[in-house]
Image (cartoon, rainbow, N blue to C red):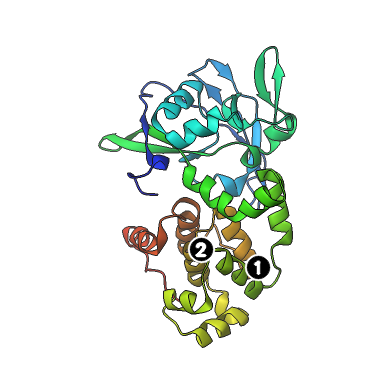
Amino acid sequence: MNSSGDAAEQVVRLSLEGTEVALKLTGSAAKNIAAALYTIYKNAEKKLIQPFAFDIEAWREEQHTFVVDRDTVTALMRQNDDFRAVMQSRSYIYADGHVVRNDPRFVKSVRDQFVLTDWANAHVDECCLRFVRVYVQQDVGKYIFGRMYYDADYVKQTQFYLHDLINQEHLDELEAKHRYCQDFPISFRDAVDQLRKRKGLSLNSLSEQLNMDKATLLRRLDDPKKYRNEDFLTVLALLFGLPDWLSRLLFKRAGLQLDDDNRRHQALAYILRVQSADGIEAANDFLKRNNQDPLSF
């Protein structure tokens, strides 16, 4: 994401020197682990947060977090108009170290305190807002937690693709996401067509952005030997502005999965997860900084 500009990237500087956040990972370390369990002690509020679980794909980098203290929430509300509107709408509330959907399925009151329900504790990525932590260098070789911001790009990207289900069928975001995934086309060609039309792109305009003629694009979309290309799928995801959960679904329809042990795949996964709203040029800049070739197919 860019470091300046819109309200999504207004930041709050935090001084956490001398404060530690202890993380303990439990469970299997297997490659295809579905969830991770964390117990976190929050010095800011001097209490233990209940252990919680989430889809490992929803938090693959250290700067993504579902945990935020109350003071930071208050500060973010002062600094970020979008986030303040979300909180003032009461559609989300602060509970047990998270900003969670204000719904009895996800939050309950215990001794005058809001806490997550058992289901919400097991699925924080489905019902809690995601934040981004940024580490800044203080001295040579020393990094401290410097700032945090509300991951509004991720929210906007998700709502763009779920808009019709939410507004026309009156589903909440969780139900809409589940329905969208259920109804997502099985064939790769149909999946791309749906995403392309939602983005308002014709086949001609898409082929132009891909620097190929329409006939070549159609052949590529119909031939698994051609579309099962990590760079090609990444470029499509960036052109469509897909949130990471939807780019993973597109890769799945192509019959392809990024390999955590492959350095190139690691870089592409980072781009799709962290820079999905920034476009192809930003992705290539990231690849260059990490001694990787630019996107090509």
Q: Nearer the viewer, mark 1 or mark 2?
A: 2
Crowding at dot 1, Cα within 10 Å, few <14 / some 14-19 / many 20+, comes out as many
Contact check, label 1 and label 2, Cβ < 8 Å: no
**Real-space CA distance between mark 1 and mark 2, rounded to the nearest whole angstrom:** 16 Å
- The residue where tag 2 is placed is 240
Name the disc covering residue 74, or none. Answer: none
**Could you say whether the residue bearing mark 1 is in a helix, strand or loop?**
helix
Name which residue type carries label 1. Answer: Arg
**Residue furthest to the left:** 140
The residue nearer to you, when weighing 174 against 48, is 174
**Residue 16 image-quadrant placement:** top left
Q: Position of residue 91 (x, y in %)?
A: 61, 32
Q: Which residue is mark 1?
A: 253
Residue 240 screen position, x and y as percent? 51, 63
Where does residue 202 sit, x and y in percent of width and height? 52, 75
User: Which residue is rendered at x = 70% and y = 67% of the image?
Assistant: 185
Mark 2 residue element: helix
Asked where in the image residue 49 lies, by quadrant, the reply is top right
